[in-house]
């Protein structure tokens, strides 16, 4: 008898709970609820991750059921949220601190009070803008907007293009039930373009030789489909490769891609990778490390007229007020070698190894002098 009573109670209460968690109940006026979005594509075309490009997201559901508990959570919190109270408290705190700052006798005291005042005001502003915890954890109701559907179509078309589907097209269809709207996006990718030939046009012959010697590592290869992400990674690879060969001031902006889709056969691409010279030079400068200087107590304030001592150990000039760190241990974590070509990887590895030391040493910066060969150069922070 008790079991039947439980089922009866559940059947009586569940509809009320469900109705309370339906996102559509929070609509206003003629608004419509964005209930569901889906993508339809030909067999074999992967749609994984494509929902991330939607311009507007539908509210999340519980176990696939039409229960939008996060929407309920947001509006439950909103009913108990009174931003005007936080605004009034913020104004009182601001007035209180302003009076203290005005009465402070020293600049140090004024600065301290100003910092505390701003920190408290920022805290109130965050609460006013973000709401209470229920509002932060929840979601506002997704109100259907046809402009967002058009924007999603544009994003899906853009995705197709970046993956080599240059002739791809996306259409959509909406369906309404009461005040709920579902949207289906239909993807027609068309043929995918592939690389038929890849060539490199490098203005600086020395740079060209380095790139050619490392071509085994290139990320864009003949026969593969066009992929914008891979082109961007190939640009980054060339940038890092050259910075590891002394080209300290090389930039990714010097690497460009020329794509010819009207090459030989249909749906094939002739790709040319252009590596240009700087605007006012017909070559790229190579930089060598002039010296390595290690300051072990850069944040220490000197006492009186004290000056830092200097000592050279393994071609590294150590600077310090007090000799409290092992030069042997520190030098083993420096991979930047005097008179060698500048290397960004060696610089980053050095920073990482030093940061793994105890805090006092980890905060110490390394200063490098990296002039180009035969030319005095500035001191740069590595």
Image (cartoon, helix red, strand yellow):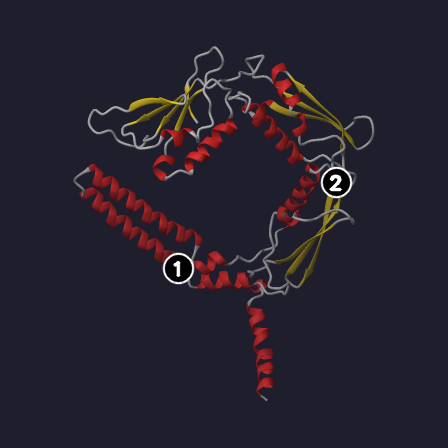
Q: x, y (%) of residue 350?
A: 46, 31
Where 32 falls versus 103 (above or below)? below
**Left or right placement of residue 221 versus residue 253 in this view:** right
Q: Residue at x 58, y 74 (%)?
A: 14
Give the residue pinned by disc 2.
Answer: 168
**Mark-to-mark CA distance, 2 and 1:** 49 Å
**Crowdedness near tag 1: few (<14), some (14–19) or many (≥20) residues, C-alpha within 10 Å:** few
The quadrant the N terminus occupies is: bottom right
Front in this rendered view, residue 379 or 225: 379
- Secondary structure of the residue carrying tag 2 is loop
Front in this rendered view, residue 13 or 308: 308
Which of the 4 quarters of the picture holds residue 236? top right
Which of the 4 quarters of the picture holds residue 113? top left
- Secondary structure of the residue carrying tag 1 is loop
Give the residue pinned by disc 1.
Answer: 82
Q: Residue at x 27, y 30 (%)?
A: 322
Of callouts 2 and 1, which one flags the residue occurring earlier in the amino acid sequence? Answer: 1
Where 37 falls versus 272 (above or below)? below
**Left or right placement of residue 345 versus residue 192 in this view:** left
Q: x, y (%) of residue 144?
A: 61, 54
Which of the 4 quarters of the picture holds residue 261? top right
């Amino acid at each position: 008898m008790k079991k039947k009573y439980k089922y009866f109670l559940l059947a009586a209460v569940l509809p009320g709970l469900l109705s309370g968690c339906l996102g559509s109940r929070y609509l206003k006026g003629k608004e419509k609820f964005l209930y569901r979005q889906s993508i339809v594509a030909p067999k074999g075309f992967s749609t994984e991750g494509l929902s991330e490009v939607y311009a507007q997201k539908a509210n999340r559901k519980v176990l696939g059921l039409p229960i939008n508990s996060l929407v309920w959570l947001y509006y439950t919190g909103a009913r108990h949220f009174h931003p005007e109270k936080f605004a009034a408290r913020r104004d009182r705190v601001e007035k209180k601190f302003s009076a203290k700052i005005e009465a402070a006798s020293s600049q140090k005291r004024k600065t301290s009070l100003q910092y505390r005042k701003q920190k408290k005001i920022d805290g109130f502003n965050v609460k006013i803008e973000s709401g209470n915890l229920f509002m932060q954890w929840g979601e506002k109701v997704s109100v259907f907007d046809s402009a967002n559907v058009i924007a999603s179509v544009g994003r899906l078309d853009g995705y197709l293009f970046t993956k080599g589907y240059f002739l791809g097209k996306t259409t959509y269809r909406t369906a309404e039930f009461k005040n709920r709207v579902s949207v289906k996006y239909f993807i027609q990718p068309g043929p995918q373009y592939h690389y038929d030939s890849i060539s490199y046009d490098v203005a600086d012959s020395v740079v060209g030789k380095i790139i050619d010697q490392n071509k085994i590592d290139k990320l864009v290869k003949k026969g593969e489909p066009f992929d914008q992400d891979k082109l961007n990674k190939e640009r980054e690879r060339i940038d890092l490769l050259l910075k590891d060969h002394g080209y300290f001031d090389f930039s990714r902006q010097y690497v460009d891609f020329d794509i010819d889709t009207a090459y030989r056969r249909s749906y094939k691409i002739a790709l040319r990778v252009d590596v240009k010279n700087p605007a006012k030079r017909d070559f790229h400068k190579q930089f060598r490390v002039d010296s390595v200087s290690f300051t072990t107590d850069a944040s220490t304030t000197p006492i009186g007229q004290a000056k830092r001592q200097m000592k050279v150990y393994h071609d590294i000039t150590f600077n310090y007020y007090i000799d409290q760190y092992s030069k042997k241990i520190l030098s083993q974590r420096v991979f930047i070698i005097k008179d060698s070509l500048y290397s960004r990887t060696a610089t980053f590895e050095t920073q990482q190894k030093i940061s793994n030391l105890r805090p006092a040493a980890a905060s110490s910066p390394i200063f490098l002098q990296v002039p180009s060969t035969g030319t005095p150069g500035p001191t740069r922070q590595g």
